[in-house]
Image (tube, rainbow, N blue to C red):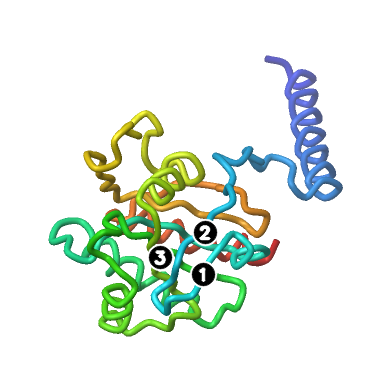
């Protein structure tokens, strides 16, 4: 290869680098993926651990994480909620952030039961909300709004239906479900916390 060819290669390389820096300066989001939402939150009406009604209006304009658990679970739920506590401790002073923990077993997890559970976790009811309600409504939210379980799992007879998932949904201020995380994996929990920080600044 001649010296002239090397000069051409060097010139065009510098040109490409300069073009990239100019574009990134003019367009801050250049090169970043702006993925569409996974889903969006439909209207809902549940009851929190203080016996108060809780609807989609209570999360309007807030960033939140939604999960499903049940108080008598001896398997994945204690691990998940220990991981969720780390998220709570990190963001408990953020007024624009909430955690919503929906029961999978509303027959057992009444308001008083959820209240005792929340108290045992030592968390503030203003930041970490424990929700109960009709089983079909709870499950429909998990599968259709939060997409943390397959909608095809909905059974005609809710008595035979049971939802048990380790996945969490992150929702932005507009009610869009941005991403799903595995609440049993510390790496994904750490990633969730980074993403929460980003959404809080939007």
Q: Please give the residue where the numbered disc 1 appears in the rendered image.
A: 53
Q: Please give the residue where the numbered disc 2 appears in the rendered image.
A: 45
Callout 3 secondary element = strand
Percent across and percent down for residue 181 are 40, 49
The 10 Å Cα crowd at callout 2, few under 14, some 14 to 19, many 20 or more, is: some
| Residue located at (78% from left, 26% from top) | 7
Callout 1 secondary element = strand
Q: Quadrant of residue 106?
A: bottom left
| Residue located at (66% from left, 41% from top) | 34
Q: Is residue 92 left or right of residue 6?
A: left
Q: Mark 2 or mark 3, which is nearer the start of the sequence?
A: 2
Extreme-top residue of the structure? 1
Q: Please give the residue where the numbered disc 3 appears in the rendered image.
A: 131
The 10 Å Cα crowd at callout 3, few under 14, some 14 to 19, many 20 or more, is: many
Q: Are marks 3 and 2 in contact (CB under 8 Å)?
A: no
| Residue located at (26% from left, 74% from top) | 113
Which of the two marks, 1 or 3, is nearer to us in this view? Answer: 1
Up/down of 191 relative to 165, above or below = below
Q: Are marks 2 and 1 in contact (CB under 8 Å)?
A: yes
Q: Assign the N terminus to one quadrant of the image.
A: top right
Alpha carbons under labels 1 and 3: distance apart: 9 Å
| Residue located at (47% from left, 63% from top) | 193
Alpha carbons under labels 2 and 1: distance apart: 7 Å
Alpha carbons under labels 3 and 2: distance apart: 10 Å
Q: Assign the C terminus to one quadrant of the image.
A: bottom right
Percent across and percent down for residue 149 are 36, 40
Percent across and percent down for residue 91 are 50, 75
Callout 2 secondary element = strand
The 10 Å Cα crowd at callout 1, few under 14, some 14 to 19, many 20 or more, is: some
Identify the mark at residue 88; answer none if there is no mark: none
């Amino acid at each position: 290869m001649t010296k002239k060819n090397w000069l051409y290669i060097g010139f065009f390389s510098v040109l490409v680098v300069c073009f990239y820096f100019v574009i990134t300066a003019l367009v801050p989001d250049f090169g970043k993926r702006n993925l569409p939402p996974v889903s969006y939150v439909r209207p809902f009406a549940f009851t929190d651990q203080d016996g108060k009604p809780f609807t989609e209006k209570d999360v309007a304009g807030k960033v939140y994480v939604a999960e499903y658990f049940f108080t008598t679970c001896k398997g994945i739920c204690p691990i998940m909620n220990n991981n969720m506590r780390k998220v709570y401790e990190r963001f408990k002073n953020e007024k624009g952030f909430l955690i919503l923990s929906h029961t999978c077993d509303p027959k057992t997890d009444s308001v008083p039961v959820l209240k005792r559970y929340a108290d045992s976790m030592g968390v503030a009811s203003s930041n970490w909300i424990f929700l109960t309600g009709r089983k079909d409504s709870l499950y429909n939210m998990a599968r259709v709004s939060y997409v943390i379980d397959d909608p095809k799992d909905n059974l005609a007879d809710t008595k035979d239906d049971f939802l048990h998932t380790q996945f969490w949904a992150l929702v932005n201020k507009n009610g869009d479900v941005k991403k799903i995380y595995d609440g049993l994996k510390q790496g994904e929990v750490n990633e969730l916390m980074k993403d929460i920080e980003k959404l809080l600044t939007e």
